Amino acid sequence: MRCAAAFLALLLCLYWTVAQGESGGLTGNDITQTEVQSEILGVKSTSDQTNITPDIWAELKELRDMVIEHRVELRNSKSKMEKLEQEITAIQTRLTASESKNAVLESKMTDSENVVKELQSENTELESKINASENVMEELKKENTDLQSRVTASEDKTTVLEARMDASENEVEELKRQNADRPKVAFSLGLTDDGDIGPFNTDITLKFSKVFTNFGQVYSPTTGVFTAPVRGAYYFSFTTMDSRNNAFRNVFLYHNDKRVLCSTNNSANGYEGVSNSLVLQLEKGDVVYLVLPAGDSVFDDAADRTIFNGFLLFPL
């Protein structure tokens, strides 16, 4: 019974020692082997008094070693705990800094997302504008194609017109050349301002002394003869008047020595006129003139009642 009480007292001492170490009251240096031995000796003296067996001493030694080992492990555990606390503090500091960085990054990310949304909106607007521009370009291409077609057609027409213009200009030049080569032949004449001419006993050639026009100088007022300068077709006309009453009035047109036209009129009243005209084919050098037969007369004055005209229609 006493052994059990002593063993219980020893266990209580060991428990108190461990409790003091955990609470910081004792350190590993405060409890020495001497103190433990003194406690054991105290217990030993008591056990000697109570006749405790030697095995208890071995158990007590083992218990002592266990206590020391636990205290060392406890001291190591505390050191590790302090290191862990420091590491945890450092990790918390890094975590706080990381959270701050994450907050900044989230803010930047939000700003970037807003910028991306704005850019997407602008891109959509640009795409719409590009589509509209492409549509306008297509319309302009169509209009340009139409204009090119019209321009091509206009150029073709212009080419045709230019060709026709060239042909017309060539024709005009040819006509000008022909006209330049063709002699200018035309005359218009009045007989006289003296009144009655005739009657005479023989046929006479009428000499028209009043020259209105005489292009080419083809009519001679001295001889009363028209001379053809070129071979061609010529037009001639004349008008005569007689002042006598109840008389025949005749005028003949001659081609060379051949009478080709006769104008005759017989009137009871005086101052009656007669006209005639024809086209003759003449060779170069042929002559044409008017002849007043014997016994007939003509009348002319400032009113130009007796006239003679002629011109070249075209060369042959």
Image (cartoon, rainbow, N blue to C red):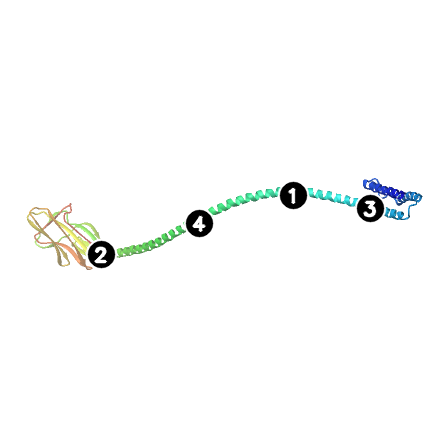
Decide which of tag 2 and tag 4 comes sooner along the chain: 4
Residue in the foreground of this view, choosing between 272 and 23: 23
User: Where's the C terminus, which quadrant?
Assistant: bottom left
Label 2 CA crowd tier, 10 Å (few <14, some 14–19, many 20+): some
Contact (Cβ within 8 Å) of mark 1 with mark 4: no
Q: Read off the residue under disc 4.
A: 138
| Mark 1 vs mark 2, CA separation in Å | 113 Å
Residue 173 percent across, percent down from the top left: 30, 55
Q: Secondary structure at mark 4?
A: helix
Q: Quadrant of residue 84?
A: top right
Q: Secondary structure at mark 1?
A: helix
Q: Which mark is residue 70?
A: 3
Q: Secondary structure at mark 2?
A: strand
Q: Read off the residue under disc 2.
A: 314
Residue 108 percent across, percent down from the top left: 62, 43
Residue in the foreground of this view, choosing between 169 and 197: 169
Q: Amino acid at mark 2?
A: Phe
| Mark 1 vs mark 4, CA separation in Å | 51 Å
Q: Amino acid at mark 1?
A: Asn
Contact (Cβ within 8 Å) of mark 2 with mark 4: no
User: Where's the N terminus, which quadrant?
Assistant: top right
Residue 12 percent across, percent down from the top left: 85, 41
Label 1 CA crowd tier, 10 Å (few <14, some 14–19, many 20+): some
| Mark 3 vs mark 4, CA separation in Å | 94 Å
Decide which of tag 1 and tag 3 comes sooner along the chain: 3
Q: Is residue 232 above or below residue 68?
A: below
Q: Amino acid at mark 4?
A: Glu
Contact (Cβ within 8 Å) of mark 3 with mark 4: no
| Mark 2 vs mark 4, CA separation in Å | 64 Å
Q: Which mark is residue 102?
A: 1
Q: Secondary structure at mark 3?
A: helix
Decide which of tag 2 and tag 3 comes sooner along the chain: 3
